[in-house]
Image (spheres, grey):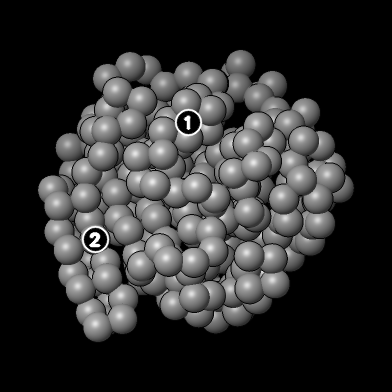
């Protein structure tokens, strides 16, 4: 059974139980804020697959992909809405260059502790991939593996150009309406915080490459060949600098969301990688 998507952010605690695969939505408090979370399956063996959403993402925007990967790998999963996204508490402060670092170093460790996750196998999309890399660099003992999709470790011209296109779609197209289905009252804050941060002139110097040599966990870096927000140079930088077993995968004809745009290929590759290393 696949948990149906809601047209608005999830709030409160909900448990849907099937014979073999429980799905539970619940609220936690981490780093001083209320966050919405979802637990998939029974945590009775191996690490937990922890899904970290993109810069405009949420639990619901993963669709049924986390459940499919959990079932295929035989592991349980955890997803949560970061502060200011989906059903989590709105963000009150202006976003800063250090936000991804603070998510990885302060909020994420507390989320894992509150959700009783001892060792995590991260599936990080875009900003979520960057957060996963940062966490793995400083917490090697708590990281079983990392899979990134469209992660950034430095800023490229194509990234900035892509975000300008997104701003135009938000202001004059239907992107605002589409995002509101998932973020409701968080929509404006989530979008402006993401876009304004990446478009700020000082953000051009943002770079995570110094952290990569500290990553020892097995790593798979995935990117669509036609990603409007990044080039294969991101994958090359990640794979060439980490100190654990690492592999890059560039998917032809795919954009920024490989787990949706190349669903079967990505599900197969991820499941195989998790089974090999977890």
Q: Horizontal placement of 83 versus 76: left or right?
A: left
| Residue 36 position within the rendered picture, expressed as x and y whole percent measured from the top left | 26, 45
Give neighbour class at mark 2: few <14, some 14-19, many 20+ (Cα, 10 Å): some
Q: Is residue 119 above or below residue 268?
A: above
Q: Is residue 159 left or right of residue 45?
A: right
Image quarter of the N terminus: bottom left
- Quarter occupied by residue 137: top right
Numbered mark located on residue 39 in the image: none
Q: CA distance from mark 2 to mark 1?
A: 23 Å
Percent coordinates x, y for residue 141 in the rendering:
65, 42
Q: Secondary structure at mark 2?
A: strand
Tell me if residue 89 can be seen.
Answer: yes
**Up-down: is 138 above or below 92?**
below
Instruction: Please tell me which residue lies in front, 162 or 38.
Output: 38
Q: Is residue 272 left or right of residue 30?
A: right
Can you say which quadrant of the picture contains the C terminus? Answer: bottom right
The image position of residue 113, as x and y in percent, is: 41, 39
The image quadrant that residue 59 belongs to is: bottom left
- Of labels 2 and 1, the one closer to you: 2
Q: Which residue is drawn at the image coordinates 49% and 66% (left, top)? A: 45
Taking depth in this image into account, of 97 and 27 the one nearest to the observer is 27
Name the residue tied to disc 1.
103
- Are the residues at dot 2 and dot 1 in contact (C-beta closer than 8 Å)? no
Q: Residue furthest front?
A: 44
Q: Residue at x 56, y 39 (%)?
A: 131
Q: Give the residue at mark 2.
A: 24
Residue 226 visible in the shown view: no
Q: Residue at x 77, y 36 (%)?
A: 214
**Crowd class of label 1 (few under 14; some 14 to 19; many from 20; radius 10 Å):** many
Q: Identify the residue shown where x is 40% and y is 63%.
A: 43
- 23 and 189: which is toward the camera: 23
* Dot 2 or dot 1, earlier in sequence: 2
């Amino acid at each position: 059974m696949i948990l149906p998507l809601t047209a608005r952010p999830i709030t409160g605690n909900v448990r849907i139980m099937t014979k073999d695969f429980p799905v539970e939505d619940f609220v936690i408090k981490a780093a001083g804020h209320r966050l919405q979370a979802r637990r998939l399956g029974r945590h009775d063996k191996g690490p937990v697959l922890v899904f970290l959403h993109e810069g405009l993402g949420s639990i619901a925007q993963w669709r049924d992909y986390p459940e499919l990967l959990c079932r295929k790998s035989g592991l349980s999963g955890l997803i949560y809405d970061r502060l200011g996204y989906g059903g989590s508490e709105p963000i009150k402060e202006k976003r800063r260059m250090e936000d991804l670092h603070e998510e990885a170093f302060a909020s994420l460790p507390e989320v894992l502790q509150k959700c009783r996750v001892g060792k995590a196998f991260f599936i990080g999309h875009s900003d979520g991939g960057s957060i996963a890399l940062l966490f793995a660099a400083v917490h090697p003992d708590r990281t079983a593996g990392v899979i990134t999709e469209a992660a950034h470790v430095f800023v490229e011209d194509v990234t900035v150009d892509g975000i300008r296109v997104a701003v135009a779609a938000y202001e004059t197209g239907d992107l605002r309406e589409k995002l509101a289905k998932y973020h409701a009252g968080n929509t404006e804050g989530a979008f402006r915080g993401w876009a304004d941060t990446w478009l700020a002139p000082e953000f051009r110097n943002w770079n995570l490459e110094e952290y990569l040599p500290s990553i020892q966990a097995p790593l798979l870096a995935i990117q669509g060949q036609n990603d409007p927000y990044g080039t294969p140079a991101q994958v090359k930088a990640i794979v060439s600098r980490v100190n654990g077993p690492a592999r890059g995968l560039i998917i032809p004809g795919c954009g920024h969301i490989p787990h949706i745009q190349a669903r079967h290929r990505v599900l197969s590759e991820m499941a195989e990688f998790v089974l090999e290393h977890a």
